[in-house]
Amino acid sequence: MSTVDLATIQVAKVVDARAMACPGPLLEAKKSIGGVKVDEVLEIWSGDASTKDDMPRWCKKVGHEFLGVLPTSGYERLFIRRKK
């Protein structure tokens, strides 16, 4: 994981998956990652606590960079850098 300031990171696309239970946010990430260019950042909003565990594993498995989680009131913001 890189040491990027998540509060100020430039994102190419935001996906609001707050109303979804697991595996909804992960499926949204899989569907949406193709909508950003290589080296751009996808931000996922999730209210499901297990997403912060699932997302890094998925990123590692498919070759993207999981940048981290930024807790926000009522949900979490997760950041993924597309690497391929």
Image (tube, rainbow, N blue to C red):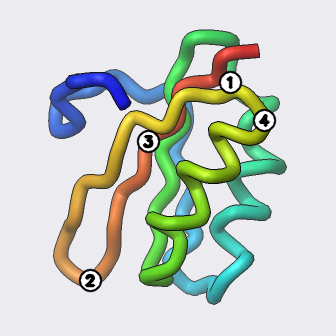
Q: CA distance from mark 1 to mark 3?
A: 12 Å
Which residue position is annotated with label 1?
A: 36
Q: Is residue 15 above or below residue 41?
A: below
For label 4, the residue is: 62
Give the Cα separation between the discs numbered 2 and 4: 29 Å
* Residue topped by disc 2: 74
* Residue marked by disc 3: 79
Q: Residue at x 18, y 77 (%)?
A: 73
Left or right: 15, with 26 as reference point: left
N-terminal label among 1 and 4: 1
**Residue 77 in the image, given as x and y percentages of width and height:** 36, 57
Residue name at image x 58 percent, y 70 percent: 17
Quadrant of the frame with the N terminus: top left
Q: Residue at x 83, y 49 (%)?
A: 31
Mark nearer the viewer, 1 or 4: 4
Is disc 2 surrounded by few (<14), some (14 to 19) or many (20+) residues within 10 Å?
Answer: few
